[in-house]
Amino acid sequence: MNRYRILVVDDEEDLCEILKFNLENEGYSVDTANSAEEALKLQLTDYDLLLLDVMMGEISGFRMARMMKAEKSTAEIPIIFITAKDTENDTVTGFNLGADDYISKPFSLREVLVRVKAVLRRTHHEEGEEAPRLLKFQNLVMDVEKKKTTIDGEEVSLTKKEFEILTLFLENQGRVFSREEILNRVWSDEVYVLDRTIDVNITRLRKKIGAYGKCIVTRLGYGYCFEA
């Protein structure tokens, strides 16, 4: 199992030690820093996740996050902000800076552990574990392995053929497919399929994917394509 390294940055020394103790009990390797200035002297690329307090000294957590996101080597390191500030504007600021989560004080240690685990699961994969194969167009997401389609996080129920047609389109955005090509790709195992069957499936697919339906464009005399 990969032993993730976590850096806790908070000007409350007692809180740093409590978080360090509990995270290490979960199997993580944990270092602490009591200011952004101290943290920035460390080799940040060694860490898989930062727990970063917002309200610190001269360099705030938000400022440190901006500095990290501006550097290519640290831009992708996940950040969970921990702060006593919990107004909507602060939360929005944190997420606009690329935060992966935002925890307001006071918090339960169980909540922190659950959120840390969730962020690491989203942003890292165990050695030998393949990342899910996802096809995306804006908020339309297809999980090719799980055969699952979502729009804005809500699952859309597609038939096998509809799923395969949409997969073909998203994998080849902008390319025009004739009915014969779609037939060979999607209905390859069936002996006799009418062109009308393809048209009906595409019509249904357009309706099911809502606003994205207009992206499936008909090229008269040629076929269909998916484009923005």
Image (cartoon, grey):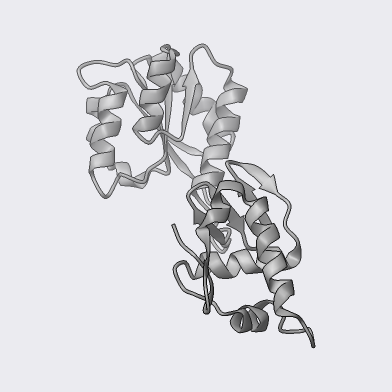
Q: Is residue 189 left or right of residue 66?
A: right
Say above or below: 85 vs 187. above
Residue appearing at x 42%, y 44% in the figure: 48
Residue 146 shows in the view: no
As drawn, the residue found furthest toward the bottom would be: 191
Residue 214 shows in the view: yes
As drawn, the residue found furthest toward the right would be: 191
As drawn, the residue found furthest toward the left would be: 58
Q: Position of residue 103 (x, y in %)?
A: 49, 22
Name the image quarter holding residue 84. Answer: top left
Q: Is residue 196 left or right of residue 51?
A: right
Q: Position of residue 88 (x, y in %)?
A: 44, 16
Q: Position of residue 152 (x, y in %)?
A: 57, 41
So how many labels did they put on this image?
A: 0
* Viewer-proximal residue among 7 and 176: 176
Name the image quarter holding residue 97. Answer: top left
Residue appearing at x 64%, y 68% in the figure: 165
Say above or below: 44 vs 61. below
Residue appearing at x 68%, y 76% in the figure: 186
Locate the C terminus by quadrant: bottom left
Q: Is residue 42 left or right of residue 186?
A: left
Q: Position of residue 121 (x, y in %)?
A: 56, 45
* Viewer-proximal residue among 17 and 12: 12
Say above or below: 62 vs 124. above
Name the image quarter holding residue 40. Answer: top left
* Viewer-proximal residue among 31 and 45: 45
